[in-house]
Every structure is written in structure tokens, then in C-alpha cells.
Image (tube, rainbow, N blue to C red):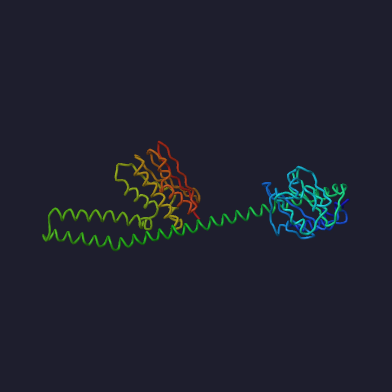
């Protein structure tokens, strides 16, 4: 009978499968002679096995084949729990090791004949198999089955723990890789959003410095002509009105592209300017800032992103909700800033929920790691943003 204490001592502290079976092989060689010893563990889904070996090297080893389907294993009946052991005097001639698709080549390639297989069990469940093989015929007797089971019982819990540890490590690595990719994408998207914002700002400055200035100069020249009697009439008045209208529209576009009020006077003032500009219809609107100006201490790109989200929410509220009251409330609790855009309108329709504006708001919030929540019903809509100040 194998010396249990000696086997336990030999495998203690071994942290990989091959080291465990090599240590065990040395201790049990006198009781269960073998030219080849391997352990095979079943994958968590029960569909594949991975094997580690010592002694003669075969293609069954994890370094060569990694994993194989349970159904092509020559000892599949053992893995499936259909038998409680397999013993053969000559696997080369045993029909159990010969069936269509069987991965038996490793056995035959190195001339293994006598084989003894017993299950590895944890809490009564088969988790793998322990296999002894020699190149001689009829090396194992029925009485060897009991000794093999003793060794299997000693090794099964240890090997299963190693497998679970390896699966946990792989899962942690995959999770870390997934998170790293997600963070890389988020940072890349944020950088792109900041670059686009800078491009908008640059276009706004160009429009302000060139196009608006040119139109203003043309408007002044027309006015001088009219005042000096050089030109007059309804056509000139209409042209002057058109230019004035173009100037008003351009200034809105410029301010939208380059939120100068945000830069000069802060977040609450910029939101108030937005609401004032949108309130072309009778709407009771207000901005309430109880944050102590905490938003203005956030990074510049974060302020701009929050401004754009609020801008989109206000556009929806003023243009589509039919609201009589619209409010933006800014509050702070500790380092947490909360911004609410609230209206008493008809709510957000299904089509609006799928529209790009709402998607853009969610995306902008995600890029700055801000919480975003939309609550909407027939009595109104609330867009809520939460972000922690660094």
C-alpha cells in the first residue's frame, strides 16, 4: 500500500500540476510501477480535458495539445462516470481504446500497453482521472485498483484546488485585459471628444473674428449709405434686415461652438445664458446653484462635457416637451456634484429615447465617468448627472 504521509509530504508546496505528479510518481513507483503517469482534469463545462504527464512523453500532455474533447478520450466512460475504473492488459489490442475519432495515438506511439485508470473525485463528483501505464503487457492486477484509488484520493483535492486557482488567475487576467481595453477606448474617445470640442472652439473663433466682423462691417457701410442718401428704398431695408438676421444667427452659432460665457463667468451663468436664449416662448425657467461654484473647480474638459449634456437636455425640454416650467438645479454634497434638468412637459417618447441626442448625453457622461439617469413620464422629465470632484 502507498505511504499516504510520504505522498502528502512530497506534494506539499508544489504549485503546478507537473511538479505534483512528478513528486507523487517517485513515491508510488515501488507500489504501482509505471513507465508513464498522467492526470487529466475536466474543464468547468465538462466538455474538455487537459492532461499533465511524467515519464514517457506523449502528445497527450498539456504542453503539446493543451485540451481535447472528452468525447475523443479513450477513457471517456471514466470521465462520464459510466465506469469506476478501467484496467487493461494491452491497450493496443483492447477495443475500448479503438473507436472512430479516438485520440489514442499518443498511447500507441510510445508503445504503452498495460493501463490502469481511476477517477479523481471531489465531493463525489468526477473531476478528472489518474492513469498508470507501462510498455509491458499485463502489468496490473485487480488488487492494484485499490492502491490507485488511494493515490487518486490523495491527489484529487490538491489538483482540483490548483485547477481552480489557475482558472481564477486566468479570469482575473482576462478581466484586467478587458478593463484595460475598455479604459483605453474610454480615454481615446474622451481625447477625441476634447479634440472635436477644440475644433468647434477654433471654428467659433474664426467665425467671430472673420465672418461676423465682415458682416458687421458690411452692415455699417449699408447704414452709412442709407444715412448719407447714397442709397435707399425697401430693397435696401430688406437687405439690411437680412444681414442683421444673419449676424444674430451667426452669433448664436459662435456662442454654441465656443461657450465663452462658460469660460468667463462659470457654469451656472453659462446655463442661464442657454436658457435665456432658448426661451423664445412663454416658459417659466430658472437656474438654482447651491453648489458653491464646485462645478467651476472641475477640470475644463469635464465642465464642457457637463455643459454639452445640459445643453442637449435643455434643447429637448424647450423644443419638444411643451413644458410650462423648466429648471436646472446644481447642488453639492461633499465632493459629489449633482445637476438636475427638470421640466413638467409631456415626457420623452420612445423615438426620442432612441434618438442620437439621448445617446450623445449618455456617451458624454460615460467619458467623464459621470452618473447619468433619465426619468420621464407624462408629468415631466428629469435628467440627473452626478460626478465627484477630484
Q: Is residue 199 left or right of residue 236?
A: right
Q: Pick out the residue farthest to the top.
A: 378
Instruction: Kindly identify the residue that appears in the image at 51 percent across and 57 percent down.
Output: 185
> As rendered, which of 338 and 61 lies closer to the eye?
61
Q: Is residue 232 left or right of residue 368?
A: left
Q: Position of residue 33 (x, y in %)?
A: 86, 56
Q: Quadrant of residue 230?
A: bottom left
* Residue at 67%, 46% in the rendered image: 45
* Residue 136 drawn at (x, y percent): 85, 56
Question: Can you give x and y, in whole percent of width and height, for residue 204 in the image?
Answer: 34, 59
Q: Position of residue 153 (x, y in %)?
A: 80, 48
Q: Which one is nearer the viewer's eye here, 130 or 151? A: 130
Left or right of residue 313, residue 56 in this image: right
Question: Total label count?
Answer: 0
Amino acid at each position: 500500500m502507498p505511504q499516504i504521509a510520504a505522498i502528502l509530504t512530497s506534494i506539499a508546496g508544489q504549485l503546478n500540476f507537473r511538479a505534483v505528479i512528478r513528486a507523487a510518481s517517485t513515491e508510488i513507483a515501488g507500489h504501482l510501477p509505471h513507465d508513464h503517469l498522467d492526470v487529466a482534469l475536466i474543464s468547468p463545462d465538462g466538455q474538455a480535458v487537459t492532461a499533465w504527464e511524467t515519464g514517457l512523453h506523449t502528445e497527450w500532455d498539456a504542453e503539446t495539445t493543451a485540451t481535447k474533447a472528452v468525447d475523443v478520450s479513450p477513457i471517456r466512460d471514466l470521465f462520464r462516470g459510466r465506469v469506476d475504473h478501467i484496467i487493461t492488459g494491452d491497450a493496443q489490442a483492447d477495443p475500448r481504446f479503438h473507436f472512430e475519432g479516438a485520440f489514442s495515438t499518443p498511447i500507441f506511439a510510445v508503445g504503452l500497453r498495460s493501463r490502469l485508470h481511476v477517477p479523481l473525485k471531489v465531493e463525489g463528483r468526477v473531476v478528472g482521472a489518474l492513469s498508470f501505464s507501462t510498455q509491458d503487457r499485463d502489468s496490473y492486477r485487480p488488487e492494484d485498483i485499490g492502491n490507485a484509488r488511494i493515490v487518486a484520493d490523495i491527489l484529487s483535492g490538491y489538483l482540483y484546488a490548483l485547477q481552480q486557482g489557475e482558472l481564477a488567475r486566468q479570469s482575473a487576467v482576462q478581466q484586467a485585459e478587458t478593463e484595460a481595453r475598455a479604459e483605453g477606448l474610454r480615454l481615446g474617445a474622451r481625447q477625441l471628444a476634447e479634440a472635436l470640442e477644440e475644433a468647434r472652439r477654433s471654428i467659433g473663433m474664426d467665425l467671430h473674428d472673420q465672418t461676423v466682423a465682415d458682416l458687421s462691417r458690411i452692415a455699417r457701410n449699408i447704414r452709412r449709405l442709407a444715412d448719407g442718401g447714397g442709397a435707399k428704398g425697401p430693397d435696401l431695408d430688406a437687405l439690411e434686415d437680412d444681414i442683421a438676421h444673419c449676424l444674430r444667427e451667426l452669433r448664436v452659432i459662435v456662442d454654441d461652438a465656443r461657450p465663452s460665457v462658460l469660460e468667463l463667468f462659470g457654469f451656472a451663468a453659462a446655463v442661464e445664458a442657454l436658457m435665456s436664449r432658448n426661451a423664445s416662448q412663454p416658459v417659466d425657467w430658472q437656474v438654482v446653484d447651491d453648489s458653491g461654484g464646485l462645478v467651476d473647480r472641475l477640470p475644463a474638459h469635464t465642465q464642457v462635457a457637463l455643459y454639452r449634456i445640459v445643453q442637449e437636455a435643455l434643447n429637448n425640454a424647450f423644443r419638444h416637451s411643451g413644458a410650462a416650467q423648466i429648471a436646472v438645479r446644481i447642488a453639492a454634497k461633499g465632493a459629489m456634484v449633482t445637476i438636475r434638468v427638470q421640466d413638467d412637459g409631456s415626457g420623452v417618447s420612445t423615438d426620442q429615447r432612441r434618438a442620437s441626442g439621448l445617446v450623445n448625453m449618455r456617451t458624454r457622461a460615460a467619458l467623464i465617468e459621470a452618473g447619468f439617469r433619465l426619468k420621464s413620464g407624462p408629468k415631466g422629465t428629469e435628467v440627473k448627472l452626478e460626478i465627484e470632484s477630484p
